[in-house]
Image (tube, grey):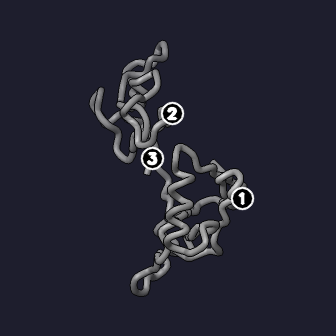
Amino acid sequence: ETTAAEALTFTLAGGLEAQIRASLSRNHGNYSKLDFWVTNKSHHFVQLPSLHVDHGTASFSFEAVPDSIYTVSSGGGQETHGIHSVPVPEKMLFPPHTDDFEIYEVDALAKYFADYGGSWQVAHDPSIGSGNNLVLKQWVRGHPGSNVWLHGTEPISLTG
């Protein structure tokens, strides 16, 4: 869990760098900028200054603060439609989530998990002396192959 701001750098690859340059050129007239937005407990889809793509490395960077969701887009023209109130503080943007997987059947998919690479299911805990404890288990040990959102993705499951 991150508790402090963190510098992040993303490098476009696999043909995406050429596509992003073409898209930025069409939509902005300047292929070095990406639209940048933030959502957190106090801000709802607020546009930040554009991010600049480094042409030599096809990368962009920004500083991410904890408990925020960032949107980066080459499309241009994003806007909020209508007036949106800021979420009530009691309704946390990222409510705490815990799961001991005990309510599931073995081989079930766990609630709030999204497999982006590989396959994950509820299984008996392989630890010695664990009794009937259930855990979330990665079922595909090797490269996820075609069971991925993006090629080159390692096995990963996200919660949310």
Please tell me whether residue 117 is drawn above or below residue 139 in the rendered image: below
The residue that mark 3 highlights is: 159
Is residue 43 visible in the rendered image? The answer is: no
Q: Residue at 67% across / 65% down in the picture?
A: 52
The residue that mark 1 highlights is: 5
Task: Tell me the kind of residue under disc 2.
Answer: Glu
Q: CA distance from mark 2 to mark 3?
A: 16 Å
Task: Tell me the kind of residue under disc 1.
Answer: Ala
Q: Position of residue 42 (x, y in %)?
A: 57, 75
Q: Residue furthest bottom?
A: 83
Q: Position of residue 33 (x, y in %)?
A: 62, 68
Per the image, label 3 sits on a secondary structure element best described as: strand
Q: Residue at 47% across / 14% down in the picture?
A: 129
Task: Tell me the kind of residue under disc 3.
Answer: Thr
Looking at the image, tell me whether mark 2 or mark 1 is earlier in sequence order. Answer: 1
The residue that mark 2 highlights is: 154
Q: CA distance from mark 2 to mark 1?
A: 25 Å
Per the image, label 2 sits on a secondary structure element best described as: loop
Q: Which mark is residue 114?
A: none
- In this orientation, which residue lies closer to the viewer: 9 or 39? 9
Please tell me whether residue 38 is drawn above or below residue 9 in the rendered image: below
- In this orientation, which residue lies closer to the viewer: 81 or 43? 81
Q: CA distance from mark 1 to mark 3?
A: 21 Å
Q: Position of residue 110 (x, y in %)?
A: 35, 39
Is residue 11 visible in the rendered image? The answer is: yes
Looking at the image, tell me whether mark 1 or mark 3 is earlier in sequence order. Answer: 1
Give the mark toward the camera: 2 or 1: 2
**Contact (Cβ within 8 Å) of mark 1 with mark 3:** no
Q: Residue at 52% across / 47% down in the picture?
A: 15
Per the image, label 1 sits on a secondary structure element best described as: loop
